[in-house]
Image: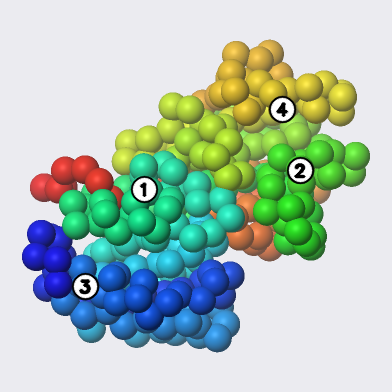
Amino acid sequence: MNATARFADQRCLGIVSPSVPSLSDACLGRLGGFFGELTVVLPRSVKHLHEVVALSGEAYPLILVIGGDGTVNQVVQHLDIESQTLAVLPSGTGNDLARGLGLPRRMGSYLQALPGFAVREIDVWRVNGRRFVNSAGFGLDAQVLTTMKSARGRLARNYVLAFIATLPRLRLLRIRAEGDGAALVDGDAWWLVAMNSPFVGGGIRIAPKARLDDGKLDIVAIHACPRWELALKLPKVLAGKHLNDRRVSFHQAECLKVESPDRIAAVEADGELLPGSRRFELAHAGRLRILCAGADTP
């Protein structure tokens, strides 16, 4: 056991995403050496994952997610945020929460840094009752994710390629969005995204000013414009210079309401597609303790 790890006496439950390649015994052995005990579960289904996490509270003070943003999102739904701490070994396609936390995304670097990890508290949010920790997106975001989930190869893994493939069939949203009671959007928009961390789509810094622990969502909207103009905005977005664009608005708010006269087909939350509705409410849902580099919280 690595005696320098601050959590070396804690029992840890490891949840492995189905998309993660098989972990070698050597790798699991190295991981296990950092905890008092490491039990690894490969869930058979999302339902099984929820059941395992929901029953883990008394036995496991620490939950280690070996996967990406989607697996983190599924775990957070049933995590006891009052008594359990989350750790993330980024092994997914996007790993945007891990980027926001500054976590190493290579196994060797992660294991080297792990003994020095400490607990940090970050915000947890809800969209229509479902928790999310990284992002919730309407319009472009959800439509691109739909393309990725139905594709194979690079198109299934690369957000920019999926955006280009989706562009010809993107649909404008008719929405009214209110943040803290003030109107933010009232009309047509290509995209509205509420961010807890800066990153979406595998490292796109859509909300450069976002902080995971400030109690606010960073809300970015791309308003209606010709489709060709939307395509030309992509380099600005990739360079993080889009907030000054005349078709882009930026706000911070502690709560958000999104309404549409038409049913919004879906919303993206941490890379997961959720059912559509005509009305969505986003609100703060508490604080989550998570292991990463940095000082201990009080």
Which residue occupies the foreground of this view, 21 or 286?
21
Measured as percent of width and height from the top left, residue 197 is found at 45, 40
**Disc 3 target residue:** 33
Please tell me which residue is depicted at 42% across the width and 53% down the height of the picture: 106
Name the mark nearer the viewer: 2 or 4: 2
Q: Amino acid at mark 4?
A: Leu
User: For numbered disc 1, what is the local secondary structure?
Assistant: loop
Q: Residues within 10 Å of mark 3 (few under 14, many from 20)?
A: some
What's the mark number on residue 234? 4
Which residue occupies the foreground of this view, 98 or 168?
98
Measured as percent of width and height from the top left, residue 77 is found at 45, 68
Q: Is residue 48 above or below residue 210?
A: below
What's the mark number on residue 161? 2
Which residue occupies the foreground of this view, 55 or 28?
28
User: For numbered disc 2, what is the local secondary structure?
Assistant: helix
Q: How many numbered marks have been drawn onto this rendered protein structure?
A: 4
In space, the residues marked 4 and 3 are separated at their CA atoms by 44 Å
**Relative to 138, 5 lies left or right:** left
Q: Is residue 88 above or below residue 53?
A: above
What's the mark number on residue 103? 1
- Judging from the image, the colouring scheme is rainbow
Q: Is residue 118 above or below residue 41?
A: above
In space, the residues marked 1 and 2 are separated at their CA atoms by 25 Å
In space, the residues marked 2 and 3 are separated at their CA atoms by 40 Å
Q: Amino acid at mark 2?
A: Leu
